[in-house]
Amino acid sequence: MGVKEEPDIVDIIERKRLQWYGHLKRMQDERLSKLIMEWIPGEIRKRGRPRKTWMEGVRAAMKTRYLEADQWLNRKEWCLGSGRRRQLSQDRKDR
């Protein structure tokens, strides 16, 4: 008891991805980073299954941490939510 489990690499990557997403969303609209994130490429696609996009990863991380879409507006609330452990890691402990 009292010893904390080290976070796995997936948890660290998702947390950093959510931190960057919140930072981008709070940026001014004319910043290059925000423009690139919101840019939608042309319709030319390669054959096969499309690769997972960065935003799909953000949405999945938000879902596992029970974050709402507009929670990034409140910086403190977003930091607390994005730093929260994934629900999946809590489920592994219960087994």
Image (tube, rainbow, N blue to C red):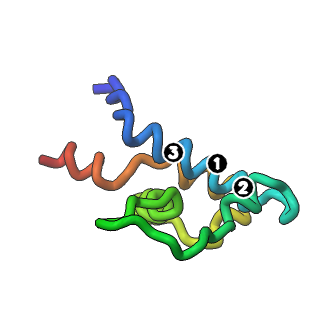
3 vs 1, front mark: 1
The residue furthest left is: 95
Residue picked out by circle 2: 24
Image mark for residue 15: 3
Q: Are marks 2 and 3 in contact (CB under 8 Å)?
A: no
**What amino acid type is highlighted by mark number 3?**
Arg
Residue 46: x, y in percent? Answer: 40, 65
Q: Quadrant of the N terminus?
A: top left
The crowd level at tag 2 (other Cα within 10 Å; few <14, some 14-19, many 20+) is: some
Dot 3 falls on a residue whose secondary structure is helix
**Disc 1 on helix, strand or loop?**
helix
Q: Quadrant of residue 30?
A: bottom right
Marks 1/2: CA–CA distance: 6 Å
Q: For mark 2, give the secondary structure.
A: helix
Q: Position of residue 12 (x, y in %)?
A: 45, 37
The mark tally for this picture is 3
In depth, the one of 56 and 89 nearer the eye is 56
Q: Quadrant of residue 9?
A: top left
Residue at 46 percent of width and 64 percent of height: 56
Where residue 88 appears, as percent x and y from the top left, is 28, 53
**Residues under numbered marks 1 and 2 in contact, where contact means CB atoms less than 8 Å apart:** yes
20 left or right of 31? Answer: left
Q: Please name whichever residue, 81 or 60, is drawn nearer the observer in this view of the structure.
A: 60
Task: In the rendered structure, find residue 64 and report the number of the disc placed on it.
Answer: none
Mark 3 surroundings: few (<14), some (14-19) or many (≥20) residues within 10 A: many
Q: Earlier in the sequence, mark 3 or mark 1?
A: 3
Q: Is residue 17 left or right of residue 32?
A: left
Residue holding disc 1: 20
Residue type highlighted by circle 1:
Trp
